[in-house]
Amino acid sequence: MNWTDEQDKRLKDLGADTATLTQSFETAEERNRAFQSLEKQMARETGDKIRHHLAEVRRPDITVLREKLAVALVEAGFTEVETPLTVSRAHLGRMGIDENHPLNKQIFWLDKNKAMRPMLAPNLYYILVDLLRLAPHPVSIFEIGPCMRKETQGAQHAAEFTMLNLVEMGLPLESRRERMEELARLVLKAADMPVDECPMVVEESGVYGETLDVESPDGLELASTAMGPHPLDAPWGIDVPWVGLGFGLERLVMARAALNGVTLNPARAGRSLGYLAGFRLNV
Ligand code: ATP
Ligand code: MG
């Protein structure tokens, strides 16, 4: 017999590895005894890790990753932008997200006309209209920042997460696919992922129709990508070919940890009151 759901949850919380989580026992008594001593030991180790983090490491993986990605993209000719954390109903409408859209139920509305942004795309579309007018093509920009969606939270979703969205507009039509893959590789490399083991697979997206997703070696969605010309371009007045990639930073941190046999969820990888740098605080 295996751990009870509650024991399994607590052990995962404390960062138990797969070998520990799949352990099996002859009797419930034996299992519960093993749990007690394991929990105590892991709680002690977690305390040590938190003290080590405070003394030596001092920064969460996600902010270090954020910086690495920004440096790599600026080096590759991209310009970083910071846009508001909120988005208007009208701009969500231009993304095709209206009352009937599945994503509409996931939006945190602040009032009738304003919401917390569930994605970066509408804000980036908005400023690209002017940038395409003002600057030589292609125009390459990116933003890294919080997005919010009402999710059934779990192993892969948090209500607050961090998105990297990079967009290149005004590039030759025939080079889009190749450029897309080049940019996906650039981001994966900057995130210390094994680039050749991360497949690009065709997926159906609620917003963009058919898209290419970038996955981790264990099949976790790391990014969704899209290309234009696209039907969503017209409401913004955009008529040049483009590529765009949206990566979840918590997912990159999780995928990186999984390569070392550590199972993280977005709450442990991202913003949290319960964890510090992925370590459970209430131990
Ligand atoms: P999923 O299919 O995993 O729910 P999605 O396709 O709805 O994700 P996208 O709109 O494609 O998400 O967002 C781009 C990226 O942002 C995703 O590939 C993922 O890495 C990340 N992401 C999206 N939603 C969340 C979330 N709730 N928590 C953590 N990361 C997320
Ligand atoms: Mg997706």
Image (cartoon, grey):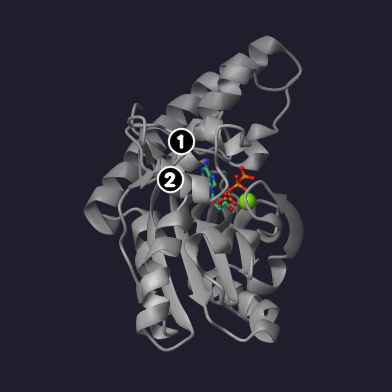
- Tag 1: residue type? Ala
The structure residue drawn at horizontal position 42% and vertical position 89%, both measured from the top left corner, is 136
The residue lying toward the viewer, choosing from 140 and 265, is: 140
Asked if disc 2 is less than 8 Å from ligand 1, the answer is: no
**Mark 2 crowdedness (10 Å alpha carbons): few <14, some 14-19, many ≥20:** some
**Mark 1 crowdedness (10 Å alpha carbons): few <14, some 14-19, many ≥20:** some
Which residue is tagged 1?
Answer: 159
Q: Which one is earlier in the sequence, the residue at label 2 or at label 1?
A: 2
Decide: is 82 above or below 205.
Answer: below
- Tag 2: residue type? Ala
Nearer the observer, disc 2 or disc 1? Answer: 2
The residue lying toward the viewer, choosing from 263 and 90, is: 90
Q: Residue 275 appears at what percent x and percent y?
A: 36, 37
Q: Quadrant of the N terminus?
A: top right
Q: Is residue 265 shown left or right of residue 128? A: right
Q: Residue extending furthest left? A: 55
Which residue is tagged 2?
Answer: 90
Asked if disc 1 is less than 8 Å from ligand 1, the answer is: yes
